[in-house]
Image (cartoon, rainbow, N blue to C red):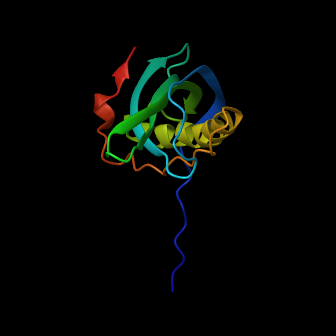
Amino acid sequence: MDTLQPKKSSVSVKSVKLVQLNFIQKDNPINLENMDIGLGFNASYSKLDSDNTIQFNLGIQLKLFQEDANKDNIDLGIMQFHLAGIFSFENGIDKKLFINLMSILYSYLRPIAAQISVMAKLPPLDLPILNFSEINPDDIEEK
C-alpha cells in the first residue's frame, strides 16, 4: 500500500492576535447543562508591504441561548471576537488557501471562548468544528 504524503504548504503563519473581544451577558441560564450556540462570521484581508504577505481578519459572533419550558428562547448573551493573523505566501497570494487561514484562526478562538465562558460562570463553550470548504474564497473582500 502506498503511503500518501501531505503537500508542504506554501503559506506560513507569522503572528496571530486577538484584536477585539466583546462579551455581553444578559439573562441568567435556567440550567448550566443545556446551552445552545448560534454562530456567524465574516472574513476580510489586506495586503501588507510585501506582495506575499497579508493580514487576514476573522470576525466571529456567538449568540448564547436556551429554551424555556414554553420553547421560547432565553437570550443568555453575545460573544464577539475579531482575530487577525499575518500570513506569508511563498509564491504570491493564493486565495484558494484563504479557507485554510480561516480554519487556523478559528482554532485559536476555540480555547479563548471556552475560557471566557468559564470566567463568566458559565460552562466551558465547546465550539463546533466548522467546515469552511463551501465558502468561495473570491467572496472574501480585500479591505
Q: Quadrant of residue 68?
A: top left
* Image position, residue 122 (x, y; %): 62, 40
Q: Residue furthest front?
A: 69
Q: Is residue 61 visible?
A: yes
Q: Residue furthest bottom?
A: 1
Left-right relation of 91 to 42? right
Please identify the quadrant where the C terminus is shown. top left
* Image position, residue 38 (x, y; %): 40, 39
Front residue of 123 and 95: 123
* Image position, residue 40 (x, y; %): 38, 33
Residue ID at (29%, 38%): 136
Q: Quadrant of residue 132?
A: top left
Q: Is residue 92 visible?
A: no
Left-right relation of 116 to 126? right
Q: Is 131 situated above or below 65?
A: below
* Image position, residue 13 (x, y; %): 62, 35
Residue ID at (40%, 50%): 131
Q: Is 41 situated above or below 7?
A: above
Q: Is 110 situated above or below 61?
A: below
Front residue of 69 and 90: 69
